[in-house]
Image (tube, rainbow, N blue to C red):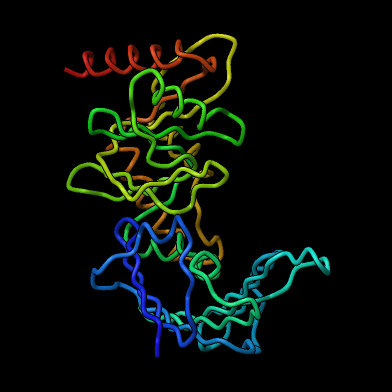
Amino acid sequence: MKCIKTYSFASTTVRLVSGCPVEDTEYYSRFLTDKTPDVTVNIFCGKLPQINGEVIAKSEKKTVIKNDSGFFVYTSYYNQKKPGFVTYACKAEHENIIDLYIDFAGGLWDKMIFNALDIPQIMVNFGSLLIHCSVVEYKGKGIMFAGDSGAGKSTQASLWKQYRGAEIINGDRGAICADGGGFNVYGVPFNGTSAICQNKSCKAELLVLIGRGEKNEFFKLDGASAFRMLLGKTTYYEWDRQSVESVLDILDRFVKAVPVFCLKCLPDESAVRTLEEGYEQYLSEKQ
């Protein structure tokens, strides 16, 4: 009997069809749905196909081979027992059908499958872009905190929860997708070390690039600066022209529709007040 499970991530719905059981994990199971799939993934358990062709990208975790049939992406994991990286999956895309081959004796579970699928890349094809940021919902609207590792994204999200009663949707990632003239931000199951993710969405009200400072400073970024700084917070295949063009298009529309600010701040309630007061002033000056 086949194992069939369907998941919804922002604007993208993915159906897994496997001849082997697929174990649910806590975060991904929150995104199960009965929607009609945009993409169907056929999973084959056993030895991986050996593809001949040109290696166009290679890292410890990914190897991409191109030939006349298309692109083939091999995924590896770090085996602590050996130690070293071991290839366990091969992905072949055919428009909205993906063949995923997995060779792993320990069984299948949702997270390992979606890691091999590179789900953020699939989401881009359907208009959603994953951004490295924490996301909170405050009074029905989304505030996104982006920044480098250790800049304080999770800290600011926690401060808004503590002092303003905001709800944290995700502590590490958010997906944006156009909706009319604006954008919505969605929770996703990818949450880094934050262990916080919810299957919720709301209107993206503003995005704040966080940096540590000796005092609080809040100012708006121009479109070009916002675009440049956010591009490094996204995920895409640099070798895939379609992926790059889609990311650039989504990000360009986002910075035109959603204001992006910079907040250099202290890790306390004063940062919350500075953002709150600065944004209220921005809105009043727009009127």
Q: Quadrant of residue 64?
A: bottom right
**Residue that extends furthest to the right in the rendered view of this protein:** 82
Q: How many marks?
A: 0
**Nearer to us in this view, 224 or 254:** 254
On the image, the x and y values in percent for residue 122 come to 42, 66
Q: Quadrant of residue 143?
A: top left
On screen, 60 above or below 18?
Answer: above
Q: Quadrant of the C terminus?
A: top left
- Relative side of 207 to 287, left or right: right
On the image, the x and y values in percent for residue 179 come to 21, 48
Q: Quadrant of residue 104?
A: bottom right
Q: Quadrant of the N terminus?
A: bottom left
- Relative side of 59 to 211, left or right: right
On the image, the x and y values in percent for residue 167 come to 34, 33
On screen, 223 above or below 67?
Answer: above
Residue at 63%, 86% in the rendered image? 48
On the image, the x and y values in percent for residue 162 come to 41, 21
Residue at 31%, 18% in the rendered image? 279
